[in-house]
Image: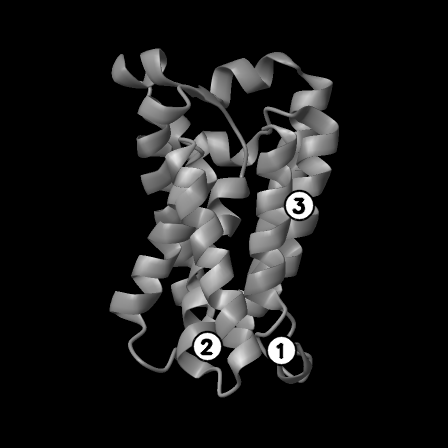
Amino acid sequence: MDFVGVLSLIAIVFCSVGNSGAAATRRQALPVLTISLASLVAAGLLGQLVYPTLLALLGRNAGAIRSGEWYRVVASLFVQDHWLIGGLFNIMMMVVVGRVAENKFGRLHWSLIYFGGGILTELIAIRWQPIGAGNSIAYMSLAGALLVSTLKDARLLRPRISGVIGLMIAVALCFRYDIHGAAVLIGAAYATVALGIRPTRSRA
């Protein structure tokens, strides 16, 4: 990912969590699902650092996927194509977005958005970015859902502006064939259709 892409991700995450009621979420339960998945992603990163061939075996490879290795569509969410620095960045961002999304949407919706968005984006990536790996597309789907919930829930103008800006950045990324933009829009679409006017706060 280039410098513009990294800045875009940070901006979208800021827009998605900056107005999502962090004070309220601190009073809620520990985000067990987020912590558990982040630990698995960290384990995958450690595994590839110890066994570098793991990335080639599990990462996204359009040719291998078309040849029948469909497990890569999911497995590539647990290894990192930017290795240590990229992996640590993704784990940190996942925790930032994931804890807010888990408390806001509940564990069931969190799982559907994270894995559903990640897998659908992996399928898009077969054309847009045939080689790669990382969980950034999964947590960016969560960010997209949070952007929509911000637009629907916010009573003030500033949070609404943040939501619009985040979605506009995602659209711009799509014009650059950046799969993270697609991930954000997939998460946003899920929130719009499945979560209705007021996102559920019940825990699965």
Determine crowd level at label 1: few under 14, some 14-19, many 20+ residues with C-alpha closer than 10 A: few
Residue sitting at x 38%, y 56%: 187
Q: CA distance from mark 1 to mark 2?
A: 10 Å
3 vs 2, front mark: 3
Name the secondary structure under disc 3.
Answer: helix
Q: State the residue in front, 95 or 174.
A: 174
Task: Point out residue 7 in the picture as x, y percentages from the top left corner.
Answer: 64, 43
Mark 3, residue position: 91
Which badge, 1 or 3, comes first in the chain's sequence? 1
Q: State the residue in front, 183 or 80.
A: 183
Disc 1 vs disc 2: Cβ atoms closer than 8 Å? yes
Name the secondary structure under disc 1.
Answer: loop
Relative height, residue 120 to residue 86 (above, below)? below
Mark 2, residue position: 203
Q: In screen coordinates, is 23 left or right of 181?
A: right
**Mark 3 belongs to which amino acid?**
Ile
Residue sitting at x 32%, y 41%: 120
